[in-house]
Each structure stands twice: as structure tokens, then as C-alpha cells.
Image (spheres, rainbow, N blue to C red):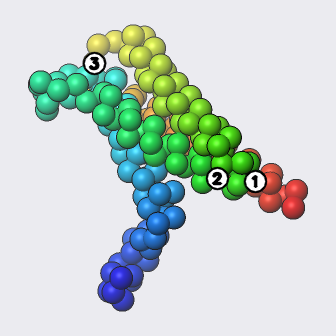
């Protein structure tokens, strides 16, 4: 990485491109973009249908969300001492519960609100941001408890 690109990365608040950062920072970061798109797709599917009339992007977005969230769970310090296979299983379970739970929340919300595309889109994005923030805070709290014990 050149000095100019390192400076740009620092100024943007991003992490340098290393294997660890790509796996446990950039992939999870990209998955949050997929997660936001998934929230809009579930809450307001007409947008995706207009953009890609012959494709259902739900599974694509869900897989990308699952991949990134699983890696994020796997990288958490409170799981560092757990054996690799069990850590992977916990991470997959956490990613699945978070992703599919979100889809279920959006499906219920969509059925409970009036048919209004702008409202559905806004509610999808805001509820997704809230769910992601709660999950982040929960994991961060677990990590801090580990540090407090040591």
C-alpha cells in the first residue's frame, strides 16, 4: 500500500487491507449493505422487481448477509477461546438467527402497515439499522464482560 492510499484509508476511518481485516471487517461491512438492501427488498419488493424484473435477489442478498454476519460473529473476542468447530457453529447459528429473524420481523411489519411504498422502505431501513445496532451492542457487551473478568 502506498503512503497516499494509507493516508486515504486512515482519513476515511477504514482499516488497512490485511487478511484479517478483509475477512472480519470488510466482508461484514459489505454484508451490512446487503442487509440494508434485503430490508428494502422484503418490505418493498416492487423496487427490486422494477430494477431486476426477471430476477429475485432475495436469496443473493440473504447469502451475502449470512456470510458477513457469520464472519463478524466468528471474530468476536468472547468466542476466541472456543474451539474452532464450535466457534464456527455458534457463528453460523448467530448469523442465521440474526438474518432470518430480521426477515421474519420485516415480513410481519410489512403485513401490519398500510400499503405505502415510502413508509415500507423507511420502516425496513430504520428497523434494520435498529436490529443491527442492538446486535452489535449485545456482542460488544459480551466482549466487554470478557475483558472485565480478565
Which mark is in front, 2 or 1? 1
Which secondary structure lies at badge 1? loop
Out of 95 and 49, give the one closest to the viewer. Answer: 95
SS state under label 3: loop
Whether residue 150 sits left or right of residue 28 in the image: it is right
Residue located at (49% from left, 21% from top): 105
Residue at 48% of width from left, 25% of height from top? 100
What residue is drawn where x is 31% and y is 27%? Answer: 58
Any mark on residue 81, and which?
1
Asked if residue 108 can be seen in this view, the reply is yes
Residue occupied by mark 2: 76
Above or below, 112 relative to 67: above
Q: Quadrant of the C terminus?
A: bottom right
Q: CA distance from mark 1 to mark 3?
A: 48 Å
Q: State the SS at label 2.
A: loop
At label 1, counting other C-alpha atoms closer than 10 Å, the crowd grade (few under 14, some 14-19, many 20 or more) is few
* Crowding near the residue tagged with mark 3, few <14, some 14–19, many ≥20 C-alpha atoms within 10 Å: few
Residue 133 or 87: which is nearer the viewer? 87
- Left/right placement of residue 10 relative to residue 130 reads left
Mark 2 vs mark 3, foreground winner is 2
Q: Residues within 10 Å of mark 2 (few under 14, many from 20)?
A: some
Q: Position of residue 117 (x, y in %)?
A: 26, 22
Comes first in the chain, label 2 or label 1: 2
Do tag 2 and tag 1 residues touch (Cβ < 8 Å)?
no
> For residue 66, which quarter of the picture?
top left
Residue lying furthest bottom:
3
Q: Pinpoint residue 99: horizontal percent, then vertical percent.
A: 48, 31
Q: Which mark is residue 116?
A: 3
Q: Are marks 2 and 3 in contact (CB under 8 Å)?
A: no
Label 2 – label 3 distance at C-alpha? 39 Å
Amino acid at each position: 500500500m502506498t503512503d497516499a492510499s494509507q493516508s486515504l484509508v486512515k482519513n476515511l476511518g477504514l482499516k488497512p487491507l490485511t487478511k484479517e481485516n478483509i475477512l472480519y471487517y470488510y466482508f461484514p461491512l459489505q454484508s451490512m449493505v446487503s442487509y440494508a438492501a434485503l430490508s428494502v427488498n422484503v418490505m418493498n419488493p416492487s423496487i427490486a422487481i422494477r430494477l431486476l424484473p426477471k430476477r429475485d435477489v432475495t436469496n443473493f442478498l440473504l447469502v451475502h448477509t449470512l456470510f458477513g454476519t457469520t464472519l463478524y460473529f466468528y471474530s468476536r473476542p468472547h468466542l476466541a477461546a472456543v474451539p474452532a468447530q464450535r466457534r464456527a457453529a455458534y457463528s453460523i447459528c448467530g448469523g442465521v438467527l440474526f438474518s432470518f429473524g430480521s426477515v421474519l420481523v420485516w415480513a410481519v411489519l410489512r403485513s401490519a402497515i398500510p400499503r405505502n411504498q415510502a413508509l415500507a422502505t423507511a420502516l425496513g431501513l430504520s428497523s434494520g439499522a435498529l436490529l443491527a445496532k442492538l446486535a452489535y451492542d449485545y456482542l460488544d457487551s459480551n466482549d466487554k464482560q470478557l475483558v472485565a473478568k480478565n
